[in-house]
Image: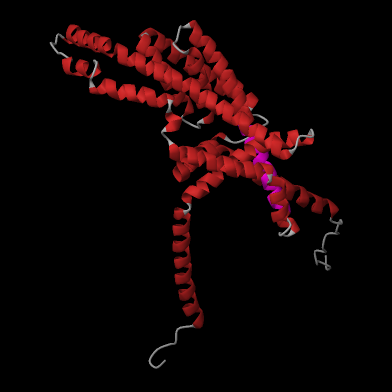
């Protein structure tokens, strides 16, 4: 090139590869967004498979065919989930109906309290009319109460996703060993070994997570059931089950979500009872955090508190509530794998040092002294 220096060939190649890489990243982002629903379904299916496979493996070792054992475990999950939603849904519908019937009384009491306390002369006739027969609010709550019991007939898309998740999870559990052998056979031995370690850790940590959460949920449900019966809370069994399940299986905010429903229901019936319920839940939560949870999860979910909290935030940001549910098992698996890898490297380094022959120190080179 006259009057200047020619552009080096490597610069031209770098520019070409830069733009090709940018286009590839843009295309891959589009593909991931288009397949986001499928990726979430696969992630949830894999999580469910990890949770159920340890039990299926134990059944297989006892002579039960793997397909039959998988079907039994899925039937148990469906029955437990169905019973939970039926009990809680029925109680919620009953309390909604109670609120509709008592709403005019609550409005009158609120009106009297405002007038007596502040010396006002307010009237809530318009609000009261909404809850009387034919009112818009009553119609809305009535339809909501009916939908709570029959929610399965109105959420077709959710049922479709649940069926898809169950189908993939069933395949991952029933055909998991065959699938892994098929994949591992096409990989170098070292990579196959690493993947086997990761798979086993993920399965053990996820199974441990579900087991520990289930134990804590049962303890929580029993304790709150006894407490709710003693303070005369409506629907004590349903509300105790709600508190036990939600507080354990929703990370970070589960305890607050679990407490909201029984406190609200108790307040509608008797404000003093609502205060007792709130105290019971708060006290039990502290006892669980400092006494029960560390003992139950000591051998199943060994994960640092900061890592657990950060993983929940990251999972929620990436995948919403699904990411929050998957965050703790994923973080526990990653922590266990990194710890195992570091321990193995330390042991190998120590073994190399022990096997190295003793060498004489080099001469200092000062022959004249």
Give above or below for 45 relative to 354. Answer: above
Specify whether 256 is left or right of 304. left
User: Residue 304, how many percent across, how many down?
Assistant: 58, 36
Q: Which residue lies at the image location 44% right of the left edge and 18% below the top edge? A: 91
User: Residue 205, how many percent across, how many down?
Assistant: 65, 37
Q: Which residue lies at the image location 55% right of the left edge and 14% below the top edge? A: 223
Give above or below for 6 relative to 187. Answer: below
Specify whether 100 is left or right of 205. left
User: Residue 131, how many percent across, how many down?
Assistant: 25, 17
In this view of the protein, can residue 135 be seen by the observer?
Answer: yes
| Residue 202 position by quadrant | top right
Give above or below for 86 relative to 361. Answer: above
Can you say which quadrant of the picture contains the C terminus?
Answer: bottom right
Specify whether 43 is left or right of 263. right
In this view of the protein, can residue 247 be seen by the observer?
Answer: no
Give above or below for 196 relative to 101. Answer: below
Q: How many labels were placed on the picture?
A: 0
User: Residue 162, how many percent across, how many down?
Assistant: 52, 39
Residue 204 located within the stretch drawn in magenta: yes
In this orientation, which residue lies closer to the viewer: 321 or 281? 321
Magenta stretch, residue numbers = 193-210
Farthest front residue in view = 153
Residue 232 located within the stretch drawn in magenta: no
Farthest left residue in view = 121
| Residue 26 position by quadrant | bottom left
In this orientation, which residue lies closer to the viewer: 230 or 303? 230
Q: Which residue lies at the image location 44% right of the left edge and 71% below the top edge? A: 19
In this orientation, which residue lies closer to the viewer: 309 or 321? 321
């Amino acid at each position: 090139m006259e009057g200047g220096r020619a552009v080096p060939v490597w610069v031209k190649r770098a520019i070409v590869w830069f733009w090709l890489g940018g286009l590839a990243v843009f295309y891959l982002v589009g593909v991931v967004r288009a397949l986001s629903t499928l990726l979430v379904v696969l992630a949830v299916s894999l999580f469910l498979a990890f949770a159920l496979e340890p039990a299926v493996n134990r059944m297989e070792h006892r002579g039960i065919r793997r397909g039959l054992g998988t079907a039994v475990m899925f039937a148990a999950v469906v029955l437990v989930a169905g019973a939970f939603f039926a009990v809680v849904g029925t109680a919620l519908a009953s309390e909604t109906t109670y609120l509709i019937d008592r709403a005019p009384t609550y409005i009158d009491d609120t009106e009297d309290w405002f007038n007596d306390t502040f010396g006002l002369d307010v009237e809530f006739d318009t609000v009261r009319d909404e809850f009387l027969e034919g009112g818009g609010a009553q119609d809305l709550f009535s339809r909501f109460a009916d939908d709570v019991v029959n929610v399965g007939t109105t959420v077709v898309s959710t049922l479709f996703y649940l069926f898809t998740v169950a189908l993939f999870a069933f395949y991952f559990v029933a055909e998991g060993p065959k699938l892994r052998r098929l994949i591992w056979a096409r990989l170098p031995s070292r990579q196959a070994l690493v993947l086997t370690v990761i798979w086993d850790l993920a399965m053990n940590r996820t199974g441990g997570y579900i087991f520990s959460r289930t134990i804590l949920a049962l303890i929580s449900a029993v304790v709150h059931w006894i407490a709710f019966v003693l303070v005369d809370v409506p629907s004590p069994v349903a509300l105790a089950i709600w508190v036990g399940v939600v507080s354990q299986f929703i990370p970070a905010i589960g305890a607050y979500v679990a407490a909201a429903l029984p406190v609200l229901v108790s307040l509608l019936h008797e404000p003093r009872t609502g205060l007792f319920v709130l105290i019971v839940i708060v006290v039990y939560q502290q006892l669980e955090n400092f006494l029960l949870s560390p003992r139950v999860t000591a051998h199943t979910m060994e994960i640092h508190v900061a890592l657990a909290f950060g993983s929940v935030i990251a999972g929620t940001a990436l995948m919403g509530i699904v990411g929050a549910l998957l965050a703790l098992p994923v973080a526990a698996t990653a922590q266990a794998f990194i710890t195992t890898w570091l321990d193995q490297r330390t042991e190998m380094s120590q073994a190399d040092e022990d096997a190295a022959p003793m060498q004489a120190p080099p001469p200092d080179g000062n022959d004249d002294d």
